[in-house]
Image (cartoon, rainbow, N blue to C red):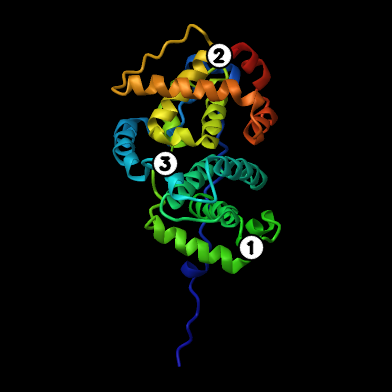
Amino acid sequence: MLENKPTQENTAKPEKPPLQVLTRPPLQNLSYENLPQPIAISTQNPQLVKIYSNEIFEFLEATEEETLIKGDYFLLHTEINHTSRAFLIDWLVNIHAKFKLYQETLYITVNLIDRYLSKRMVTKKQLQLVGVTAMFIASKYEEIYPPNARDFLMTTDQAYSKQHLLKMEVDMLKVINFHITFPTAWRFMEKYPELFHNGAGILAEYLLELGLIEYMMIKYRPSIQAAAVICLANFLQNKSFTWKAEDPNESLIKECVKDFYKIFKSSSNHPLTSVREKYMRKKLDVVRLEEDAQ
């Protein structure tokens, strides 16, 4: 039997080429013209997708009518009124801040409350359950890590059970026909990024949130409210500011600005202070602005 003896060819290891050390010219020999230049960073938020913003806001404006409340729905209620709603939302502002939720969540919550109360008659005892359920739904829709049912029930001092919350959730979703995707005034604020300067941005947020407490403001479309607070905030910061945005609803915006201005001037004496205290914690000089507005 033949033996497979290794030959010289297949036993010899291939020789490796000698290592070549790559060198580069010293830094002092490089001309400044050839140095890499820093990438120009845009000051605009890429999430605003400026190239599509006009189409986006045209679509939002076309759909905002779908979730508007027509008329005074409190005429249908016997145990709750505008004051009851104001106290509920003022309390929810604190809950919203406690859980550190997104601003959009608060605006969705208030819209769900108004739409539900416009079609369901509730008692005073059920009103807090309506509010906490609306925020429960809004959180699950908007937040990445929403608080669970137990967290929300604890905010009510265990006034309701988990079965109460889940039953109200099912009924609320049926009443609003599972329609949770809609434009809010907070979303329309992104339409005017160029006017967010010299502190006008946070002041506009404050004005808009003050409007959530007042029932009379639901007569204005979200796009009108957003334009109005942007205009008013810039005016309060700069008395010579003039609204230059071309808008077919300019007269309606001016009317809305007047209502927001009344709300702002009365905020220092308002019995419900959650929004005011929230923005004072954000270092907004509310007192000085109120004194200047007088």
Query: Quarter holding the C terminus?
Result: top right
Tag nearer the camera, 1 or 2: 1
**Which residue is denoted by mark 2 in the rendering?**
237
Instruction: Say which quarter of the image contains residue 224.
Output: top left
Q: Earlier in the sequence, mark 1 or mark 3?
A: 3
Q: Residues within 10 Å of mark 3 (few under 14, many from 20)?
A: few
The amino acid type, in three-letter code, at marker 3 is Asp
> Which residue is at 34% across, 19% downward?
251
Residues 220 and 135: in front is 220
Horizontal side of residue 200 vs 245, given as left or right: right
Q: Position of residue 157 (x, y in %)?
A: 71, 57
Mark 1 and mark 3: Cα distance apart in space = 28 Å
Residue 40 seen in render: no
**Residue 72 shows which numbered tag?**
3
Residues 210 and 226: in front is 210
Mark 3 and mark 2: Cα distance apart in space = 34 Å
Tag nearer the camera, 3 or 2: 3
Q: Earlier in the sequence, mark 1 or mark 2?
A: 1
Element assignment for label 3: loop
**Residue 160 shows which numbered tag?**
1
